[in-house]
Each structure stands twice: as structure tokens, then as C-alpha cells.
């Protein structure tokens, strides 16, 4: 009987997790509804495809500027890969690894700051 | 919990690298907060001097740390000193040129510093993974520096060629490391050395394939024939101070790693010596023969740098303490006189519209006697004439070869040196004995480039007469290496 | 279980395709992709060896390689963009100011 009770409580935690997950999404929707401006127009209701027209020939030229954003994305995206093994092993790594990771993220943040100041994030 | 006390976390071991990185960040930070017209060469200068001091201060400190990832021995520290000094000289000699071409952006100094840091990482480790990382930290800024004149088609072309070849070489290197890892279960050279006989008896094919692929990868980086085709184009197209940097620093870094991998890690693979014998002969002969017919001084220096890679490769074929110390001696000497040669070329090219073709040289001796004398000195040093350090460098290399029984290698090397004298003297002849109808545009000296010229010229001659210091330096650099 | 040699053969084939692609392709973007293919072949070999040796180092190494590949791709594409702005082509045959 003890095993059943254990598995019951495990299911219960999953259930709570699901409710909290759904609840937090609904809560953010609600929150954003409170503070956002309300200004609907027709283009907003078409499917979102990274600011390109979703209907038409798929062989058209992309704007060059997408490359810049793609590059920025790829770099920061890949750097984040290092966070996962760090997070998994964090319990064994201790304070030293925390400090190292903070330095790592600061360096990344500095890179982003540099790109921002040089206007790489602007759509000119 | 992981025990960090035995891991050797000692930031003193990587103090020069940290200094370089912090300096580069400070430069980028300042440049991104306010718009700068002059690039902050002073900050870079101070950072490099600090780095040089920190590197010298590490001398004769044999330690490994960071879980064995960093090993700070005299061999690595010698290269740290060499790289920071090279970077310093390149920074000084490029200052006026970059302003004259309108590419004096602060990123140039930052990239130079980060690339230098990568080289230091490469030279100061016995772990193949860290070597690969160092190589990439070195190479990626170099790709950008090759294309730094981004409005110039030549510079664009140099950048893309260098990038393609560099990335291609990295892929080979990586595959090689993967095979070595598969054969031995580790990427740490010390552990590979410890049971190489077991590894090569059980996984012989893997270890040979790995060594071959690593050799191809570094062959591209140090511009050994048959992997040299990118060199002249990249050297000609890149901004001249960047070319000066290319011709010495990445080459020295590549050789530092090759000496470690092939003479320390894979010392027991006997076929390697024969392979390096062939590569060395090919590299010096092809480099020298192709240099004979060049009409542009930068291209000529590019082929000459290929030939010099061939001479240094003699040490890899020969092996042993004496050859390694001769190789370090030669790398230092080559850095000094090659940078000197490029300083003169940079000075000549700072005048607008000049591409350092041979046809621009006549009149140099008549109008600028000191400059042409210094140019001649560097050319003689490159050719290996006696009173200069170039002669001694070649002498020690070939003497080491003869002592170990590689008579033919030494003979071919000496014959190649004689061949090379022909084209170096062509430069001297063009500046002294040829005449041209067009008047020679005078060059404008700056204190920075005069300092570089004096340092390199004094080094070339002074070390030729009194090589004792450099000899001791290169001998103690291999202490605890082999 | 699939033997390690099977993964290795795939890795070597991928590496070969990449090498040949770089050597014969005339388009810079295709050359890029081939270099990425070579890097990923090496990654596959690393993972396969790591699995068969039961040492985890290889996995960590692959993370590093991925990062390096991203940095290289960023710089390479930036160079291609600079070239495209200057001359409106990315065909490597047109690059003949400096002869190869």
C-alpha cells in the first residue's frame, strides 16, 4: 500500500505542476492585457512568420539584415548550451563554478552591450 | 563536491592571458561608450607591456594547473614572451598605416590582443582540446583582421580565402583529435605519452590517422607545402601590418604546438620523422623556387615565409633537445628580422597609392640611405648572411641535423639558403642600382615605426654578434620539455 | 547495439563529402555548409568514441566544438556580407584580383 501512496503523491505533484504551468501562462496573458495598448488592425491577425509575408512564392530574397540578427542569435544561443551541463552538475560544483558562470555570463552580456552600442540591434 | 584544492586553480598561471583579455575588453568598452576617432593604441600598448612583464616574471616556473588543462613550463612561457613582444611591435608599426588607410578603428587593437591571447593558450597546454580552443581564439580574430579594410576588394578577398582555408584546416585538426581521442581515451598528451606503445599496438590505425589529420591541420596553419596555396594571396591582400603579424605570430604558435604534439606526444611514431623530412624539403624548395619570379615585395616575403617554415620543419624531422632549442632560436630570430622587413614595407606603403611592387623601389637608396641600408640588412638576415642572426639561426638548425645524422637534409637546406639569396638580393639591387624616371615620393617617419626599425635592426645585428643570451634563453626553454 | 565502427564509417563518409564539397564548390555559402558538415562529422566521431570508451570528455568537447563552429560561421557570414556589399556576387570564381 505504501508504494501506491507514493505514486499517488507523485501524480499529485505532476498535477500541481500542470496547474501552475497553465496558471502562470494565463496570468501573464491577463497581466499583459492590463498594461498593453489596444490597437487591432488587419495585418496583426495574419500568421506570424518573422515579419515576412507568409503567403506567396517561397523563393524570394530575404532582407540582408536578417543575417545580422541570425548571427547574433546563433552566437548567444550556442553559448547558452554551456548553462545546461552547469545547471545539472551545480550541486557538486560549488561556489567556484557559480563565480565562473557569473563571469562567463558577464562576458556574454558585455558582447551584447557592445553589439547594442554599435547599432547591430537596430533595424535601419 | 569536487575538490578544488588539488586542481591547481592558480590565476597566476594565466595572468598574462587575463591581462590581454581585460585590456581588449576595456578598449571595446571605451569605444562603445563614446565615439573615438583615434584608436586607443595607448591602452593596448600599456596592456601589452604589462602582459610582457607578467610573462617574463613567470620564467622558470614549472607548474600545471586547472585540472591539468594549463601547463605553464619554460617552453610555453618563452612563447608567451615572444607573442607579446611580437604583438607590441606589430601594434607600433601599424599605427600610422591604419590611419593613412582610414581603418584606424579601436577593434583592430582589441582583435590583435585577443588573437595574441589565443596563441598563448595554444603554447601553454598539453591538452589537445585546449590547443584547439586556443587555435580558434587565435584564428577567428585573424580572419577579421585580414578583412579589416572592408571597403577594399583585395582585403575582402584575403579575408575570405584565409577564412575558408583556416576553417577547412580546423575541421581536419578536429577530426584528427577525435581519432586520437578514440585510440587513447584521452586528449591529454602526457597520458598519451605514458602508454603510447600500448595504444599504438592496439589502435595503430586510429593513432596514425589522427596524427596525419592533425598534421594536415597544422600544415595549413604554418603554411607547409602542399597546404600553402592561400599564403601569397592572403599576405598580399591583407593590410600590411596585419600581414606582418600573420607572417610571424600564428606561424610561431603553430610550430610551438607542433613541437609539443609531434616531438613530445607522438615521439614514438617512427614514420613521422620521414614525413617531416619530405615536408621540410618540399616546403623550403617550393617556397624558394616560387619566390624567384615575384614582382611584388609583399608576395616575395610571403613565399619567403613559406621557405622559412621549411627550415624550421627541419627541427621536427630531426627531433631531440638540440633541434628544439635551435627551432626556438630560429623562430625568435625570424620574428625579429621578418618584422623588421615588414616594418620597412609598411613604411613604404603608407605613402598613398603604393603597393610595394619592385618598380617602386628604385630611388630608395639615393633619397633614404639609412632606410635602404636597414632594408638591405633585413634582406641579408632573411637570406642567412654571416654577421646577422639569420646566419646563426640556420647554422644551429643545420648543425643539429648533421649531429643526428640527417646529412642530406642539412645539405638541401644549405643549398636552399643559397638559392634564396638570389631573390633577397633582387630587392637590394632594385633599391640601390636601378633607376626609374619617376621621382621617389619621400616617406614620413613616425616615432613608433622608427622605434620598431631600431629595435629589429639592433636585434638582427646585435644577436648576430652576441647570440649568447638568446642561446641560453632557447636552451632553458626546453628544460623539462622532452 | 550498433558497433562503434558503424558510426565511424558514417562520420568518415560525411567528412569526405564535406572535403570534396569544399574543394569543388564555387559558391561560398555551399563551401560554408561543407565545412560545417566536416565539423559535425568530427562531432559524430567524438560522440561515438566517447560512448564506446565510456568516458564523458568527448561530450564536453562536442559542446566546445559547437560553440567554435557558431563563432566561425558568424565571422564567415560577416565576411561574405562585406563582400556582397562590395561586389554583388558570392561566386568564388570572380575573386581573381589576387590570383590563387
Image (cartoon, coloured by chain):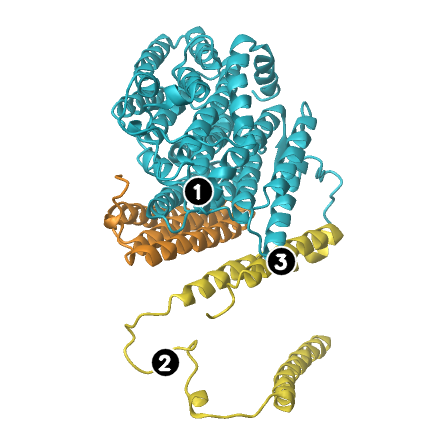
Nearer to the camera, B301 or B249:
B301
> Are both tags, 2 and 3, on one chain?
no
N-terminal-most mark, 1 or 3 = 3
Disc 2 crowd rating (10 Å Cα; few below 14, some 14-19, many 20+) is few
* Colour in which chain A is drawn: yellow
Q: Estimate the x, y position of residue B94 in percent, counting from the top left.
A: 49, 37
Task: Please state which of the two labelled residues, at mark 2 or mark 3, is closer to the viewer.
Answer: 3
Nearer to the camera, B400 or B213:
B400
Q: Estimate the x, y position of residue B398 in percent, counting from the top left.
A: 42, 11
Q: Quadrant of residue B402?
A: top left
Q: Judge whether B37 appears above or below B50 on screen.
A: below
Please give the chain letter of the residue carrying mark 1: B
Q: Which residue is mark 3?
A: B33
> Are both tags, 1 and 2, on one chain?
no
Q: Can the viewer see residue A119?
A: yes
Nearer to the camera, B240 or A14:
B240
Instruction: Give the Cα separation between the discs numbered 2 and 3.
Output: 37 Å
Q: Which residue is mark 2?
A: A53
Please give the chain letter of the residue carrying mark 2: A
User: In what element is the residue under mark 1?
Assistant: helix
- Residue in the image at 65% along x and 41% along y: B18
* Colour in which chain C is drawn: orange
Q: Estimate the x, y position of residue B183 in percent, counting from the top left.
A: 46, 37
User: In what element is the residue under mark 2?
Assistant: loop
* Colour in which chain B is drawn: cyan
| Residue B105 falls left or right of residue B298 | right
Task: Please state which of the two labelled residues, at mark 1 or mark 3, is closer to the viewer.
Answer: 3
Q: Quadrant of residue C98?
A: top left
Q: Which residue is mark 1?
A: B174
Disc 1 crowd rating (10 Å Cα; few below 14, some 14-19, many 20+) is many
Amino acid at each position: 500500500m505504501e508504494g501506491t501512496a507514493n505514486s499517488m503523491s507523485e501524480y499529485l505533484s505532476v498535477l500541481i505542476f500542470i496547474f501552475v504551468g497553465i496558471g502562470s501562462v494565463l496570468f501573464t496573458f491577463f497581466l499583459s492585457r492590463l498594461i498593453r495598448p489596444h490597437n487591432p488592425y488587419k495585418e496583426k491577425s495574419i500568421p506570424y512568420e518573422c515579419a515576412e509575408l507568409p503567403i506567396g512564392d517561397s523563393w524570394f530574397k530575404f532582407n540582408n539584415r536578417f543575417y545580422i540578427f541570425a548571427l547574433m542569435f546563433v552566437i548567444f544561443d550556442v553559448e547558452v548550451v554551456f548553462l545546461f551541463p552547469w545547471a545539472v552538475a551545480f550541486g557538486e560544483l560549488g561556489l567556484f563554478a557559480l563565480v565562473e558562470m557569473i563571469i562567463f555570463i558577464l562576458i556574454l552580456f558585455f558582447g551584447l552591450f557592445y553589439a547594442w552600442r554599435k547599432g547591430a540591434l537596430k533595424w535601419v | 563536491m569536487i575538490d578544488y584544492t588539488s586542481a591547481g586553480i592558480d590565476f597566476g598561471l594565466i595572468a598574462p592571458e587575463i591581462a590581454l583579455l581585460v585590456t581588449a575588453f576595456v578598449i571595446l568598452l571605451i569605444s562603445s561608450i563614446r565615439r573615438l576617432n583615434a584608436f586607443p593604441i595607448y591602452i593596448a600598448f600599456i596592456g601589452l607591456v604589462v602582459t610582457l612583464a607578467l610573462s617574463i616574471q613567470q620564467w622558470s616556473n614549472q607548474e600545471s594547473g586547472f585540472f591539468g588543462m594549463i601547463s605553464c613550463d619554460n617552453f610555453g612561457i618563452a612563447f608567451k614572451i615572444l607573442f607579446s613582444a611580437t604583438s607590441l611591435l606589430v601594434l607600433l608599426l601599424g599605427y600610422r598605416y591604419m590611419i593613412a588607410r582610414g581603418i584606424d578603428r579601436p577593434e583592430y587593437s582589441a582583435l590583435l590582443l585577443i588573437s595574441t591571447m589565443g596563441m598563448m593558450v595554444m603554447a601553454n597546454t598539453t591538452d589537445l582540446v585546449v590547443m584547439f580552443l586556443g587555435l580558434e581564439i587565435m584564428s577567428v580574430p585573424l580572419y577579421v583582421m585580414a578583412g579589416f579594410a572592408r571597403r577594399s576588394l583585395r582585403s575582402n578577398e584575403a579575408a575570405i580565402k584565409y577564412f575558408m582555408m583556416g576553417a577547412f584546416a580546423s575541421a581536419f585538426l578536429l577530426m584528427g583529435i577525435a581519432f586520437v581521442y578514440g585510440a587513447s581515451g584521452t586528449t591529454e598528451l602526457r597520458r598519451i605519452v605514458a602508454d603510447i606503445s600500448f595504444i599504438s599496438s592496439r589502435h595503430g590505425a586510429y593513432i596514425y590517422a589522427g596524427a596525419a589529420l592533425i598534421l594536415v591541420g597544422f600544415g595549413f596553419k604554418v603554411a607547409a607545402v602542399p597546404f600553402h596555396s592561400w599564403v601569397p594571396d592572403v599576405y598580399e591582400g591583407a593590410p600590411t601590418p596585419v600581414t606582418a603579424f600573420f607572417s610571424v605570430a600564428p606561424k610561431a604558435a603553430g610550430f610551438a604546438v607542433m613541437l609539443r604534439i609531434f616531438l613530445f606526444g607522438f615521439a614514438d611514431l617512427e614514420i613521422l620523422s620521414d614525413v617531416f623530412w619530405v615536408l621540410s624539403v618540399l616546403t623550403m624548395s617550393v617556397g624558394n623556387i616560387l619566390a624567384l619570379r615575384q614582382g611584388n615585395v609583399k608576395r616575395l616575403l610571403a613565399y619567403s615565409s613559406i621557405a622559412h617554415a621549411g627550415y624550421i620543419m627541419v627541427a621536427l624531422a630531426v627531433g631531440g633537445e638540440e633541434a628544439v632549442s635551435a627551432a626556438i632560436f630560429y623562430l625568435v630570430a625570424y620574428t625579429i628580422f621578418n618584422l623588421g622587413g615588414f616594418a620597412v614595407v609598411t613604411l613604404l606603403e603608407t605613402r598613398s597609392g603604393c603597393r610595394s611592387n619592385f618598380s617602386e623601389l628604385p630611388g630608395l637608396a639615393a633619397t633614404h640611405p639609412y632606410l635602404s641600408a636597414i632594408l638591405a640588412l633585413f634582406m641579408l638576415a632573411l637570406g642567412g648572411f654571416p654577421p646577422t642572426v639569420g646566419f646563426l639561426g640556420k647554422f644551429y638548425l643545420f648543425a643539429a641535423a648533421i649531429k643526428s645524422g640527417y646529412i642530406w637534409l642539412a645539405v638541401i637546406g644549405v643549398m636552399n639558403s643559397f638559392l634564396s639569396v638570389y631573390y633577397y638580393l633582387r630587392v637590394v639591387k632594385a633599391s640601390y642600382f636601378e633607376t626609374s624616371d619617376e621621382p621617389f615620393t619621400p616617406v614620413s617617419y613616425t616615432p613608433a615605426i622608427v622605434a620598431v626599425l631600431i629595435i629589429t635592426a639592433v636585434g638582427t645585428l646585435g644577436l648576430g654578434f652576441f647570440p649568447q643570451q638568446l642561446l641560453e634563453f632557447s636552451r632553458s626553454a626546453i628544460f623539462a620539455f622532452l | 547495439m550498433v558497433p562503434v565502427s558503424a558510426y565511424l564509417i558514417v562520420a568518415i563518409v560525411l567528412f569526405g563529402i564535406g572535403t570534396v564539397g569544399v574543394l569543388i564548390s564555387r559558391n561560398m555559402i555551399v563551401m560554408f555548409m561543407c565545412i560545417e558538415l566536416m565539423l559535425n562529422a568530427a562531432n559524430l566521431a567524438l560522440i561515438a568514441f566517447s560512448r564506446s570508451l565510456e568516458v564523458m570528455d568527448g561530450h564536453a568537447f562536442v559542446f566546445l566544438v559547437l560553440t567554435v563552429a557558431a563563432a566561425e560561421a558568424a565571422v564567415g557570414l560577416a565576411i561574405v556580407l562585406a563582400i556582397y556589399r562590395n561586389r554583388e556576387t558570392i561566386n568564388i570564381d570572380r575573386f581573381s584580383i589576387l590570383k590563387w
